């Protein structure tokens, strides 16, 4: 099945495979924050508009400002706390935020043969996603 959001086949299975890899091997897990954010931005039906904008800002902070995930967690603790948050992150209706389905890179461009290659590919994918979404109006 071809994904209408990223244009690739079986991307969800690949995403789940990557999550398992990242949670079981710290070398792969070093880029977990980029994997999730890049995937969610390309699969906007899983997010509300506000959630998508939040994810885009996270990716920018990770890649442009070089903020580590631990810093972002502290910085955004109250912002994303479900009891305090003023917006919803996850979409309940499955409506796409973006109609874009052609991307320069997707999760399918990531190689998994070793942690170094994987991390480099995840970072390249995330940078590509940020470049393509940073000026989009949603």
Image (cartoon, helix red, strand yellow):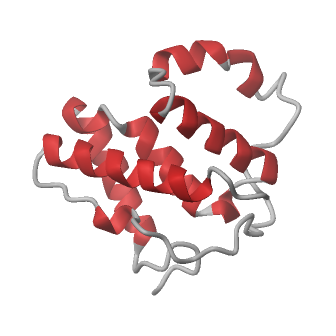
Nearest to the observer: residue 125 or residue 89: 125
x then y, percent, for residue 37:
52, 45
Q: Quadrant of the N terminus?
A: bottom left
Asked if 72 appears above or below 108 in the picture, the reply is above
**Residue drawn 57% across the image and 19% down it:** 73
- From the top left corner, tell me how far across and down residue 65 is, in percent: 51, 25
Q: Residue 48: x and y, percent? A: 78, 53
Residue ranking furthest to the left: 113
Q: Is residue 115 above or below residue 110?
A: above
Q: Nearer the viewer, residue 34 or 11?
A: 34
40 and 130: which is toward the camera: 130
Q: Is residue 10 left or right of residue 77?
A: left
Give the residue drawn at x 70%, y 39%: 54
Residue 25, quarter of picture: top left
For this orientation, the residue located farthest to the right is 86
Write down the quadrant of residue 77 in the picture. Answer: top right
Q: Is residue 85 left or right of residue 32?
A: right
Q: In x, y percent, where is residue 16?
A: 39, 56
- Where is the C terminus found, in terms of image quarters? bottom right
- In this image, 111 relative to 16: left or right? left
Decide: is 61 above or below 50.
above
- Left or right? Give the position of 121 relative to 54: left
Q: Residue furthest bottom?
A: 1
């Amino acid at each position: 099945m071809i994904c209408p959001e990223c244009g690739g086949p079986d991307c969800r299975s690949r995403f789940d495979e990557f999550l398992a890899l990242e949670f079981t091997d710290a070398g792969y897990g070093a880029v977990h924050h980029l994997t999730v954010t890049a995937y969610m931005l390309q699969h906007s039906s899983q997010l509300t508009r506000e959630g998508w904008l939040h994810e885009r800002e996270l990716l920018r902070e990770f890649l442009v400002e070089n903020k580590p995930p631990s810093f972002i967690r502290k910085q955004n603790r109250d912002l994303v706390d479900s009891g305090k948050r003023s917006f919803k992150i996850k979409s309940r209706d499955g409506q796409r935020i973006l109609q874009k389905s052609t991307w320069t890179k997707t999760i399918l461009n990531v190689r998994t043969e070793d942690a170094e290659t994987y991390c480099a590919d995840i970072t390249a994918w995330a940078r590509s996603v940020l470049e393509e979404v940073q000026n989009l109006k949603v």
